[in-house]
Amino acid sequence: MLVLLRFPFAFLNESISFGHFNCYIQKRWKKPVNSAQTRLENRARDLQFDKLVRQIKKLKLILRLHELMSQRRASHTSVQLVSRWSNVVGLNVGVGSFIQKHPRIFEVYTHPVKRNLCCRYSQEMLGLIAEEAMVIRESEMAAVQRLKKLLMMSRTGRLNAHALWLVRTEFGLPDDFRASIINKYPETFRLVLPDSVELVDQDDSLPAAEVEKWRESEYKEKWLSEYETRRDFNMTANLRELLLKHPGIFYISTKGNSLTVFLREKYAKAFGGAELVTIWQ
């Protein structure tokens, strides 16, 4: 025991064997771990996508602050109150420095009566928020078609309403889509207890998915069996593993609190590969 205590702690991970006449220390070499997590950490970074994720995260934070400020009955919001919302919106820096860093979004002023420091959104930012809301309202029918497609992709024809609300921005759905879309089109959608959205009737007018067209052509041209044409993509339970195997098609960004997946070709066609210029830069 006295001999073992003399060894440094670094030797705790080494195997120690004692013989009748000698003792030796054999270092145990561990095989490098090759997992989805290690491949994710060692992959080549795409600075353009990572920068876009940081911008999207910042935009969501700013819109969340606007939502909280809009819900107040008072006509002003103190900087001290906004600082209390840091944990709610996920702000990990000081509120004062964050507001000062974005002068085109926030305006800081002294309350004429209470004489405390307050903040509000600039007219430029309020105009952009109003413009986005107008575009969403004008794109109502496109949102209806998009929601129908999402429900048709579901195995049961149902999706959790709260899950849809969480991704409403990504799919162009209004914040009040329960009232403005689901309740407005009862012949198409209905709410099912406890909290699901269900498609009333399948819409045959929607175009078939490209993969279905490909399967049909494969079936007709190559005379494949029904099993070979209607099976899935052999997607494993580990979706991250599948995405990492195709770095030329997908890019996973680890910026923020969650993983974000980009379809490289779709992004290049939509934005021409150019970086987005936002008012908070």
Image (cartoon, rainbow, N blue to C red):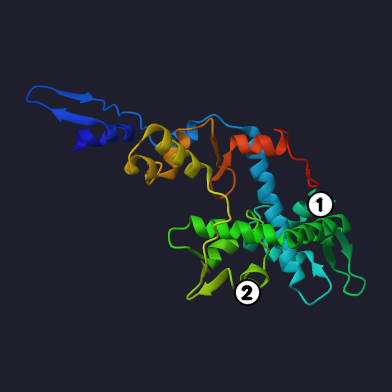
Identify the residue at horizontal 29%, vertical 32% (top origin).
11
Identify the residue at horizontal 80%, vertical 50% (top origin).
102
Horizontal side, residue 64 vs residue 102: left or right: left
Identify the residue at horizontal 43%, vertical 58% (top origin).
155
- Residue 277, given in percent of the width and then of the height, sits at 78, 41
Q: Quadrant of the rendered structure where residue 78 is? A: bottom right
The residue wearing badge 1 is: 100
Check disc 1 and report its element: helix, strand or loop: helix
Q: Is 86 located above or below residue 223 in the figure?
A: below
How many marks overall?
2
Q: Is 16 located above or below residue 168 in the figure?
A: above
Q: Quadrant of the rendered structure where residue 8 is? A: top left
**Discs 1/2, front:** 2
- Residue 129, given in percent of the width and then of the height, sits at 79, 58
Q: Is residue 170 visible?
A: yes
Q: Earlier in the sequence, mark 1 or mark 2?
A: 1
Query: 10 Å neighbourhood of mark 2: few (<14), some, or many (≥20)?
Result: some
- The residue under label 2 is which amino acid type? Asn
Q: Quadrant of the rendered structure where residue 188 is? A: bottom right
**Discs 1, 2 touching: Cβ within 8 Å:** no
Q: Is residue 81 visible?
A: no
Quadrant location of the N terminus in the rendered image: top left
- The residue under label 1 is which amino acid type? Gln
- Residue 272 is labelled as none
- Residue 183 is labelled as 2
- Residue 226, given in percent of the width and then of the height, sits at 34, 43
Horizontal side, residue 154 vs residue 73: left or right: left
Quadrant location of the C terminus in the rendered image: top right
Query: 10 Å neighbourhood of mark 1: few (<14), some, or many (≥20)?
Result: few
